[in-house]
Image (cartoon, helix red, strand yellow):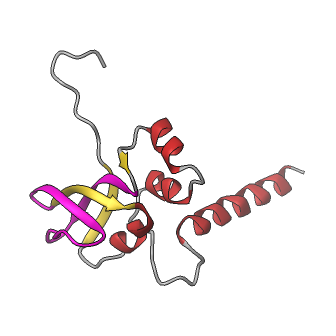
Amino acid sequence: MKGTVVRVAIGTTLAVSLGACGSAGARESCDRLDSQLAQLRAASDRSAFAHDHGLEVTGDRVRVVVETNGGLQSDADIQVESSYASDVLGEARIDRLCALAARPNVLLVRPATRGIPLGSPP
């Protein structure tokens, strides 16, 4: 009985993972997309999901950090706010997160973290 439950759980996890960024045969790869952003992309109520998980969403865009091996320029998928070394901070289109993560020079796309002012309680 326990073996059956494990198989079902693994199958469910695989189905959810594939559903977040398309089918297994899709051209876009979400391997370099943070799991929280993949869940946002698949959420039926993105605004509620973003609020519950502390993601900064404005309209159809989410604030992200893109770790690259050569930088990134603003285009239709991302509006670059700033960069430091090989990290790029910007607002990315939620529907295009997988395409952004699949670029050859992108190592990882993850949510941006909010700064906490010095002296503020945690």
Residue drawn at the location 51% of the way across and 50% of the way down: 46
Q: Nearer the viewer, residue 99 or 32?
A: 99
The furthest residue to the left: 85
Nearest the eye: 19 or 60:
60
Q: Is residue 118 above or below residue 104?
A: above
Residue 71 percent location from the top left of the image: 14, 68
The residue at 39%/43% (across/down) is: 55
| Vertical position of residue 117 compared to residue 64: above or below | above
Q: Picture quarter containing residue 18? A: bottom right
Q: Residue 22 location in percent, x, y? A: 56, 74
Q: Is residue 98 left or right of residue 79?
A: right
x then y, percent, for residue 82: 12, 54
**Residue at (40% x, 62% y) in the render:** 33
Identify the residue shown where x is 28% and y is 72%: 76
Between 117 and 87, the one lying in front of the other is 117
Percent position of residue 47, x then y: 49, 45
Rendered-image quadrant of the C terminus:
top left
In the image, farthest residue toward the front: 59
Residue 85 shown in magenta: yes
Q: Which residues are magenta?
A: 60-86
Residue occupying the far right of the picture: 1
